[in-house]
C-alpha cells in the first residue's frame, strides 16, 4: 500500500483548503475526484493505493463468509495512521478529510473507528464492515457520511445499517443515504457528498 506524494498533484494547493485522503484511487476523470476539485478548490488530494492483492482478498472474504482479513486490515490501519499523522504534522492548520469507496471505504472505516482524531470529516461510500467495532467515545461529534445501495450484491444493506447504528450509538454526527441501486456511485450520492463537504464546520 502506498500514499501518493503531494508533489504529484498538478495544481497548487491552498494552505486554507483541506487535505483530502482518497481511498478509492480516483483518476483525473473520476467523478469523485472531479467533485473534490470543484467542491474544495485548492485542496490537497492524497491518493491511497491499496493494491490488487489486498483488494481481491478483502472482496473474496467479504462475499464468501462476510469476514474481512482482519489481520491484514489491522496492519494496514496502523501503517496508514502513522502516515496520516505525519501528513498532519506537515500541515497542522489544515483540516483533514477522508473519502473512501468500496474496499477503500472499508479500510477507511476501520481507520476511523480506531483513530477518530485523524479526520475532521469522513465519507464512507459503500463500505463493508462485517464486524462490530468496540466503542470509542472519541467518535462523538465526528461528521460522517455513509452511503449504500439497496441492491448492492457485494455490500449487504443490513451491514451498512449496522455500521450507521454503531456510529450513532457513539454519538457521531452521522448521515446515511441508501440509494435505490447497486454498487455504483450515482448522482444522488455525488450530490450528498458535495453537500457534506461544503457544510460549514462549527
Image (cartoon, helix red, strand yellow):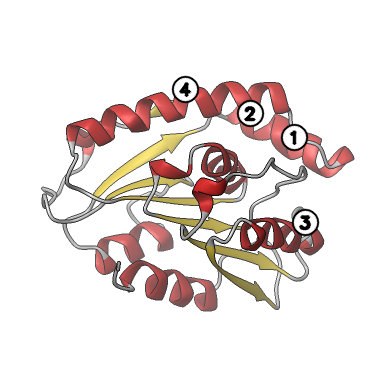
For mark 1, does the 10 Å Cα neighbourhood hold few (<14), some (14 to 19), or many (20 or more) residues? many
Distance from the alpha carbon under mark 2 to that under mark 1: 8 Å
Q: Which mark is residue 73?
A: 2
Please name the residue that numbered disc 1 is placed on: 68
Please name the residue that numbered disc 3 is placed on: 159
Can the viewer see residue 44? yes
Residue at far right of view: 65
> Which of pointers 4 and 2 lies earlier in the amino acid sequence?
2
Can the viewer see residue 53? no
For mark 2, does the 10 Å Cα neighbourhood hold few (<14), some (14 to 19), or many (20 or more) residues? some
Residue pictured at 78% horizontal, 69% vertical? 151
89 or 44, which is in the foreground? 89
Distance from the alpha carbon under mark 2 to that under mark 3: 18 Å
* CB under 8 Å between discs 4 and 2: no
Lateral position of residue 54 relative to residue 3, left or right: right
SS for dot 2:
helix
Amino acid at each position: 500500500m502506498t500514499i501518493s506524494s503531494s508533489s504529484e498533484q498538478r495544481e497548487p494547493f491552498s494552505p486554507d483548503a483541506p487535505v483530502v485522503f482518497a481511498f478509492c484511487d480516483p483518476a483525473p476523470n473520476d467523478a469523485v475526484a472531479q467533485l473534490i476539485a470543484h467542491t474544495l478548490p485548492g485542496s490537497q488530494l492524497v491518493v491511497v493505493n491499496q493494491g490488487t492483492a489486498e483488494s481481491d482478498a478483502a472482496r473474496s472474504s467479504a462475499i464468501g463468509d462476510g469476514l474481512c482479513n482482519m489481520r491484514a486490515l489491522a496492519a494496514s490501519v496502523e501503517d496508514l495512521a502513522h502516515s496520516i499523522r505525519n501528513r498532519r504534522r506537515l500541515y497542522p492548520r489544515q483540516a483533514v478529510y477522508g473519502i473512501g469507496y468500496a474496499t477503500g471505504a472499508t479500510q477507511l472505516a476501520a481507520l476511523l473507528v480506531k483513530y477518530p482524531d485523524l479526520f475532521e470529516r469522513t465519507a464512507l461510500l459503500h463500505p463493508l464492515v462485517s464486524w462490530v467495532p468496540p466503542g470509542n467515545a472519541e467518535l462523538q461529534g465526528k461528521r460522517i457520511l455513509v452511503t449504500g445501495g439497496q441492491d448492492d450484491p457485494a455490500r449487504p444493506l443490513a451491514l451498512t445499517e449496522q455500521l450507521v447504528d454503531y456510529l450513532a450509538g457513539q454519538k457521531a454526527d452521522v448521515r446515511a443515504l441508501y440509494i435505490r441501486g447497486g454498487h455504483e456511485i450515482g448522482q444522488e450520492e455525488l450530490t450528498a457528498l458535495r453537500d457534506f463537504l461544503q457544510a460549514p464546520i462549527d
